[in-house]
Image (tube, rainbow, N blue to C red):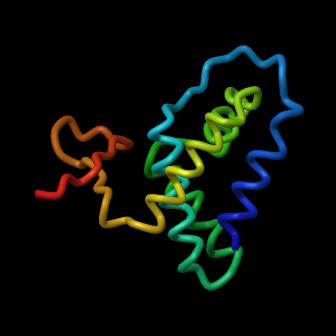
Amino acid sequence: MLGASLALSTLLCFPACNGDDRQAAITREDYILAYVEILLAADQAPDSFAASDSARAILARRGLTEEDLLGYARQYAEDPSHLALAWQEIHDRIRNPEDFEEDTTGDGEVGSANRVREQ
């Protein structure tokens, strides 16, 4: 429920925010991974205060801010199909987490994920 309201508010709130020509500070993958983790944590939280605390901790660990997430949404406010596809990806990863794994090897960069390949 929280995820649906968060997604809806993101999609509905930002079409009015136009004229901002700045580039998004985060990548699509950073945006998706942060929201997946935040929404999964919120689903496990006993209340909205705990969910907010979890979200802040997740963003801090990923080196992101709320403004980074909002900035990404603002960047694509004029392209609702882009945001819809990002939210579909978020939904897919929450529904089928076993199909995705976060890459924590290599250069240690947070925010890159790979679809798990079936063999």
Identity of the residue drawn at 30% across and 38% down: 109
- Give the residue at the far left of this rendering: 119
Q: Is residue 15 placed above or below 13 in the rendered structure?
A: above
- Give the residue at the far bottom of this rendering: 46
User: Which sits in the foreground, 36 or 63?
Assistant: 36
Identity of the residue drawn at 58% across and 79% down: 45
Residue 12 drawn at (x, y percent): 83, 46
User: Which sits in the foreground, 68 or 114?
Assistant: 114
Identity of the residue drawn at 31% across and 60% down: 99
User: In which quadrant of the rendered view does residue 42 lie?
Assistant: bottom right
Residue 2 drawn at (x, y percent): 69, 69
Identity of the residue drawn at 20% across and 35% down: 107
* Residue 26 as seen in the image, left or right of residue 47: left
- Give the residue at the far right of this rendering: 16
Instruction: Locate the N terminus by quadrant.
Output: bottom right
Q: Is residue 9 placed above or below 69 in the rendered structure?
A: below
Residue 97 drawn at (x, y percent): 37, 65
User: In which quadrant of the rendered view does residue 43 lie?
Assistant: bottom right
